[in-house]
Image: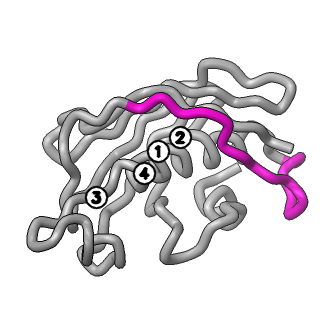
Amino acid sequence: MGEKEILSKLPYSKPFLFVDKILRIDEDGVEGEYTFDEDLDFYKGHFKDNPITPGVILTEVMAQIGLVCLGIFLLKNQFNNKTSIALTSTNIEFLKPVFPNEKVTVISQKTYFRFGKLKCKVSMKNERDEVVCNGTIAGMMV
């Protein structure tokens, strides 16, 4: 399953689609990119005159690339429009801010995938190759 097919199966659309490109994907993990457009609505109020990306949005980017894209790949032909993906847990440490117009890379390593549950170690890096946040994310595929 290739990048275009995986992206077409994502259950999101703009303005809540946070995957621009999948750089690498296999049975063990995924790496992908997203660039934060300065016109995204949440920048208008987070924070006034000094916008930064909210941690909940960084977590969502890591979940979309690191969990959902990988889950679609792992399910291959079993994934269809009746398949749901639900986030079950996160444990994320935030280390650096992410500003408007920054491109980030998400690197996800599968910890386990069985009985429909996928758990991954996920990190996000900025264009300077600095880790901006990392942790674990888990979800159920049903």
Residue picked out by circle 4: 56
Crowdedness of circle 1 by 10 Å Cα count: few (<14), some, many (20+)? Answer: many
- Element type at marker 1? helix
Q: Earlier in the sequence, mark 1 or mark 4?
A: 4
Q: Quarter-wise, where is residue 88 in the image?
A: top right
Crowdedness of circle 3 by 10 Å Cα count: few (<14), some, many (20+)? Answer: some
What mark, if any, has residue 53 been given in the picture? Answer: 3
Q: Amino acid at mark 2?
A: Gly
Residue picked out by circle 1: 62
Q: Is residue 12 magenta?
A: no
Distance, label 1 to label 4, CA atoms, is: 10 Å
Specify start and end residues of the magenta stretch as a single range: 77-92
Q: Amino acid at mark 1?
A: Met
**Image quarter hosting the C terminus:** top right
- Element type at marker 2? helix
Give yes or no for contact between labels 3 and 1 (Cβ–Cβ under 8 Å): no
Does residue 23 appear in the picture of this structure?
Answer: no
Determine whether, in the image, residue 132 is placed left or right of residue 7: left
Residue 43 in the image: above or below residue 61: below
Q: In x, y percent, where is residue 7?
A: 61, 62
Does residue 80 appear in the picture of this structure?
Answer: yes
Residue picked out by circle 2: 66
Distance, label 3 to label 4, CA atoms, is: 8 Å
Q: In x, y percent, where is residue 138?
A: 63, 32
- Mark 2 vs mark 4, foreground winner is 4
Q: Earlier in the sequence, mark 2 or mark 4?
A: 4
- Element type at marker 3? loop
Q: Which colour style is shown?
A: one colour
Give yes or no for contact between labels 2 and 4 (Cβ–Cβ under 8 Å): no
- Mark 3 vs mark 1, foreground winner is 3
- Mark 2 vs mark 3, foreground winner is 3
